[in-house]
Image (cartoon, rainbow, N blue to C red):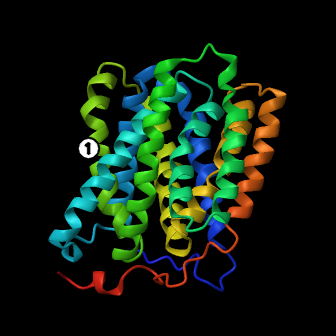
Amino acid sequence: MIAAPVGRPGTAVPPWALAATAMLAVQLSSALSVGVIEDVGAAGTAWLRLTFGALVLVVLVRPPLRAVRRADVPAVLALGVTTGLVTVLFLGAIARIPLGTAVAIEFLGPLTLAAARGGSARALVWPVLALAGVLLLTAPWHGAVDATGVGMAVLAAVGWAVYIALTQHLGDRFVGLGALALTVPVAAATAAVVGVPQAAGHLSVAAVAVTAGLALVHPVLSYALELLALRRMTASAFGTLMALEPGFGVVLGVLVLHQDPRPSQVVGIALVVLAGGAAQRGGRREHAPPLGDAEAARPA
């Protein structure tokens, strides 16, 4: 089983850097998936990406089945199903609305989680500042918004908040990347329910090859980095740090998809970057496990 020590206190890689790199990986994979979505649909793309990611994780990490207790099963299934649904919903959203807008709406889930777990009135300052940036990015006052795309992004936001909480919980329970080897296959099976019918008859060698490559970036790399970061950060700090993600989404939307941001969106990016960077200060968990719960390594 892989046991990655990256992100321990005292190492060269701080947890906020792991989280930021994961966000960049997610948005890069999303931007590069748009062409595949046009061929096999959003659900079909989600299914292919998660399936290839699950295969990589099962081969390299091996699911720690002997360490799974009966009490772990609901959390494993919930995280897997949530991951699958969020992937389908988010890809469906970016097929309808700009990438930066979809990411900004999705960020409202982690933002709400951060505000709820902040523990003090002062902790609300950065989520509120980030929310102001999100509003500038989405500019709802302009109208002409695709209601279906926005609705998918909102549902993805709810799922993303659940994902953060469950990932931190299971990351503490299982050594290394074992939690991912358990949950990503469940996510792939969830996405297959709608993804297989949508992709049927539209698969090509090119689409399969592209999604196989993208799967290494997201979910494999991104989920691994997020899990390692959440072992070292509070859920509140991680959730607010995700304010950086709309900025990544807008920048990649410009560079990859040629989506031009308005001046107000540039201001919004500056606000969310400021809020995200400030929120992670003091966000380390005081009693974080080194690589996962040692007890979880023993057979149940």
Horizontal side, residue 134 vs residue 268: left or right: left
Q: x, y percentage for residue 276?
A: 69, 56
Find residue 181 and report its image quarter. Answer: bottom left
Residue 171 seen in this snapshot = yes
Q: x, y percentage for residue 213?
A: 50, 44
Horizontal side, residue 168 vs residue 268: left or right: left
Query: Which quarter of the rendering shows the N terminus?
Result: bottom left
Residue 206 seen in this snapshot = no
Q: Residue at x 56, y 57 (%)?
A: 115
Q: Residue at x 65, y 34 (%)?
A: 100
Horizontal side, residue 251 vs residue 151: left or right: right
For the residue carrying disc 1, how many other residues have a C-alpha within 10 Å: few (<14), some (14-19), or many (20+)? some
* Front-most of residues 196 and 20: 20
Q: Amino acid at mark 1?
A: Ala
Horizontal side, residue 241 vs residue 209: left or right: right
Q: Residue at x 72, y 41 (%)?
A: 133
Position of residue 189 relative to residue 231, above or below, is above
State how many labels appear: 1
* Front-most of residues 257 and 214: 257
Q: x, y percentage for residue 113?
A: 50, 55
Q: Which residue is mark 1?
A: 189
Find residue 141 and report its image quarter. Answer: top right
Q: x, y percentage for residue 187?
A: 32, 47
Q: Residue at x 68, y 35 (%)?
A: 135
Which residue lies most toward the top here? Answer: 144
Find residue 61 and report its image quarter. Answer: bottom left
Q: Secondary structure at mark 1?
A: helix
* Front-most of residues 169 and 175: 169
